Amino acid sequence: MARSYGQYCGIARALDVVGDRWALLVVRELLYLGPRRFRDLRAGLPGLAPNLLTRRLRELERAGVVARAELPEPARVPVYRLTRRGRALEPV
């Protein structure tokens, strides 16, 4: 992510990761609904453009908040899920 508050307190560091528009709402979807396919995330977040969702997911992956996985046979489709770090955001 390009923007940073440049501070070392926990709140500022968390905002560096989930403070961009839509990021925390992506976390919310995964937290309460579990692993989701890209199209399911889009359906749950009306108004979020596909390119912006892609960007947010990549940023959250780089930050260790979201991980990409694949559903087992017969589905074998990619899904996004929260990591332990992502689940730790539940109190927010």
Image (cartoon, rainbow, N blue to C red):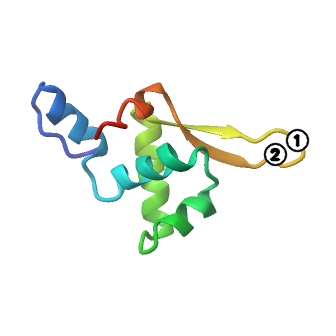
Residue 17 percent across, percent down from the top left: 30, 39
Left or right position of 40 against 58: right
Kind of residue at badge 2:
Arg
**Residue position for label 1:** 73
- Cα–Cα span, label 2 and label 1: 5 Å
Q: Secondary structure at mark 2?
A: loop
Position of residue 80 measured from the top left corner of the image (x, y, whole percent) = 58, 44
- Quadrant location of residue 55? bottom left
Give the amino acid type for the residue marked by disc 1 in the picture: Glu
Question: Which of the labelled discs sits on residue 54, or is there none?
Answer: none
Contact flag, marks 2 and 1 (Cβ < 8 Å) = yes
Measuring 83% from the left and 49% from the top, which residue is drawn there?
75
Above or below for 83 versus 75: above
Determine crowd level at label 2: few under 14, some 14-19, many 20+ residues with C-alpha closer than 10 A: few
The residue furthest right is: 74
Residue furthest bottom as drawn: 47
Q: Is residue 27 above or below residue 47?
A: above
Give the quadrant of the C terminus.
top left
Rendered location of residue 50, percent (x, y): 50, 67
Question: What residue appears at the point 15 percent right and 35 percent down from the top-left corner?
Answer: 12
Residue at image mark 2: 76
Closest to the observer, 72 or 2? 72
